[in-house]
C-alpha cells in the first residue's frame, strides 16, 4: 500500500471539506467531486503498486474523515450556507441532532464514494496498462 499517495490524494477531501462549508453549494458539488475522482483515479493508476481498487477506497475513507470532521466542527457555518439540507434534516427522526447525523451520514457517504473511486481507479489502471509485447 502506498500510504503517502492515499494521504496526499485525501487532501482534496480536506480542501473540499472547507470549500463546501464556505463556498461550494450542494447543487454543483458533484462536478468538483467528479473531477477530483478522475484525477485521483489517474494518479492511483500511475503511482500505486497494485491493489488499485483498495487505494481508491481508502482514499475516500480518509476523505470522509476530513469532510465529516470539518462539517461537524463548522456545523453552524455549514448550516447557514446549506439551509435546504438543514431543512430536510429537521424532518428526520432526531433531526435536531445535526452533528450526530453528520457523524452517521459521513461514513456512509465515504463508503459509497470509496466504492466509486475504487472502481474509477481500477478502471483507470486497466486502461493504462500497455499490451503485452510479443518476443
Image (spheres, rainbow, N blue to C red):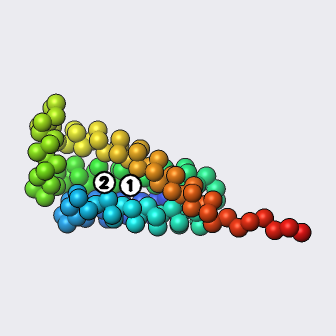
Residue 107 versus residue 11 in the image, above or below = above
Residue 67 versus residue 87 in the image, above or below = below
Q: Are marks 1 and 2 in contact (CB under 8 Å)?
A: yes
Q: Is residue 56 something that shows in the picture?
A: no
Residue ID for mark 2: 67
Q: Residue at x 13, y 58 (%)?
A: 81
Residue 69 versus residue 46 in the image, above or below = above
Left/right of residue 115 with respect to residue 92 in the rendered view? right
Residue at disc 2, secondary structure: helix
Please provide percent x and percent y for residue 111: 41, 44
Residue ID for mark 1: 63
The outermost residue toward the right is: 135
Locate residue 126: give its quadrant. bottom right
Q: Is residue 43 something that shows in the picture?
A: yes
Q: Residue at x 64, y 56 (%)?
A: 50
Please provide percent x and percent y for residue 46: 59, 67
Disc sitting over residue 100 in the figure:
none
Instruction: Pick the quarter of the image with the C terminus.
Output: bottom right
Amino acid at each position: 500500500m502506498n500510504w503517502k499517495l492515499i494521504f496526499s490524494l485525501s487532501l482534496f477531501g480536506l480542501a473540499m471539506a472547507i470549500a463546501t462549508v464556505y463556498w461550494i453549494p450542494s447543487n454543483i458539488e458533484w462536478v468538483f467531486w467528479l473531477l477530483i475522482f478522475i484525477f485521483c483515479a489517474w494518479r492511483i493508476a500511475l503511482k500505486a503498486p497494485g491493489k488499485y481498487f483498495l487505494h481508491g477506497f481508502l482514499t475516500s475513507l480518509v476523505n470522509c474523515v476530513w469532510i465529516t470532521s470539518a462539517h461537524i466542527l463548522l456545523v453552524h457555518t455549514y448550516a447557514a450556507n446549506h439551509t435546504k439540507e438543514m431543512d430536510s434534516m429537521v424532518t428526520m427522526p432526531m433531526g435536531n441532532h445535526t452533528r450526530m447525523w453528520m457523524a452517521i451520514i459521513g461514513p456512509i457517504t465515504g463508503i459509497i464514494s470509496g466504492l466509486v473511486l475504487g472502481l474509477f481507479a481500477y478502471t483507470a489502471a486497466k486502461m493504462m496498462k500497455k499490451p503485452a509485447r510479443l518476443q
